């Protein structure tokens, strides 16, 4: 079976035809891990008082915050609808009836073709999407860390033989299971990368090379907080005490596996949302249904999305996301 504990420095391995991929022992192993990971995620989130809802697949608008990715258009009874790149707007709307909720949500993002070889991008993927009414960023971070820890522990307990068959050393998770995850700000991460000779922009999300560098230097997952305004979607709440700084976070896995979770406190104030939309170049008219709800009142909240395939890749130690997806669609590659 495929044996690796680290992403190789060369290009990620290329997918094989679908029939061959589905029959491969590696695929079967990855699905065994995925099944346990989803079981554990549901168990943990239900224990946190969350209700599981089934997410929408199409809508008049979708999350504009995906970096470099486009939404697919759908003709919906003559209306131009989008396939969900993320159901974030629906999570906020759902707070009207559900204080704490989660989805296991399919997402479709038409990533630029040059991301096909990164091993970190798929056009179709899933997220464990969580939203918590009245929560602060710290509470959302705590739930994200608790979720990851619970999943790792459950997978190590239930399918250690599968991990062993993949060559994944359980010692890779020792530090993760023993303590609190560190936190650094975006500005601190930028300083660290620049100090090491990587030209990271202070105004943008950490780029892939920077993210992988930080990820390889760590021995357990860690949070990056306080991204600059303009680097993320309009729904990430701006810090009232520090204009230009967002009350958001990413959770980065160690060992070169990179970002597993993105989350934030949400903007809930109608006027602020409209202003933030305009600032980010979005047309508020497209968000009619969402803004109507915001005007009536959406509860304050914080939440996050955890990439299922990225999580499973981290658990299995495999090189590329397509290896942990049963039906992989790589950017720019036309496949069944």
Image: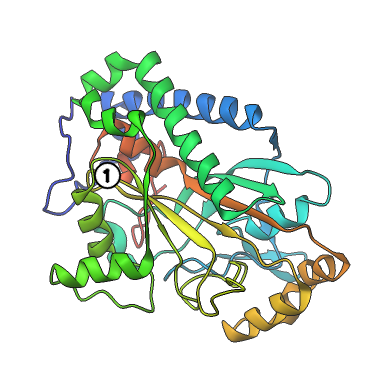
**What's the residue at 60%, 73% (across, down)?**
234
User: Where does residue 50 sit, x and y in percent of width and height?
Assistant: 69, 35
Q: Residue furthest right?
A: 296
User: Where does residue 271 sit, x and y in percent of width and height?
Assistant: 76, 79
Q: Is any atom of residue 207 visible in this view?
A: no
**What's the residue at 78%, 43% (across, down)?**
98
Q: Give left or right: position of 61 versus 333.
A: right
Q: Give left or right: position of 295 versus 221.
A: right
Q: Which residue is mark 1?
A: 254
Q: Is any atom of residue 181 visible in this view?
A: yes
User: Where does residue 151 sit, x and y in percent of width and height?
Assistant: 45, 28
The front one of 27 and 272 is 272
- Tell me where residue 201 sits by quadrant: bottom left
- Tell me where residue 5 sits by quadrant: top left
User: Where does residue 80 sit, x and y in percent of width and height?
Assistant: 69, 71
- Classify mark 1: helix, strand or loop: loop
The front one of 150 and 65 is 150
The front one of 1 and 270 is 270
Q: Is residue 301 above or below residue 273?
A: above
Q: Give left or right: position of 99 versus 202.
A: right
């Amino acid at each position: 079976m495929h044996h690796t504990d680290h992403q190789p420095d060369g290009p990620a391995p290329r997918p094989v035809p679908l029939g061959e991929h589905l029959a491969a022992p590696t695929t079967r192993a990855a699905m065994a891990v995925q099944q346990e990971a989803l079981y554990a995620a549901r168990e943990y989130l239900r224990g946190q008082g969350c209700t599981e809802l089934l997410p929408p697949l199409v809508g008049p608008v979708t999350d504009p915050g995906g970096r470099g990715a486009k939404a697919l258009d759908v003709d919906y009874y003559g209306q131009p609808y989008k396939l969900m790149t993320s159901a974030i707007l629906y999570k906020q709307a759902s707070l009207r009836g559900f204080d704490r909720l989660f989805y296991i949500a399919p997402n479709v993002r038409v990533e630029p073709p040059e991301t096909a070889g990164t091993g970190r991008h798929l056009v179709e993927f899933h997220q464990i999407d969580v939203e918590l009414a009245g929560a602060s960023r710290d509470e959302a971070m705590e739930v994200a860390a608790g979720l990851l820890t619970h999943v790792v522990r459950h997978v190590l307990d239930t399918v250690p033989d599968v991990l062993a068959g993949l060559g994944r050393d359980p010692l890779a998770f020792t530090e993760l299971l023993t303590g609190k995850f560190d936190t650094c700000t975006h500005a601190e991460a930028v300083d660290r990368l620049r100090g090491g000779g990587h030209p990271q922009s202070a105004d943008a999300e950490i780029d892939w090379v920077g993210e992988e560098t930080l990820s390889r230097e760590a021995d357990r997952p860690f949070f990056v907080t306080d991204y600059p305004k303009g680097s993320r979607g309009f729904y990430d709440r701006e810090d009232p005490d520090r204009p230009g700084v967002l009350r958001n976070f990413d959770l980065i896995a160690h060992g070169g596996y990179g970002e597993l979770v993105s989350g934030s406190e949400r903007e809930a104030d109608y006027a602020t949302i409209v202003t933030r939309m305009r600032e980010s170049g979005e047309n508020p008219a497209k968000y009619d249904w969402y803004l109507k709800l915001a005007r009536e009142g959406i509860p304050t909240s914080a939440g996050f999305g955890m990439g299922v395939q990225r999580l499973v890749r981290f658990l299995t130690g495999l090189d590329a996301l397509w290896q942990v997806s049963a039906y992989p669609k790589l950017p720019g590659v036309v496949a069944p």
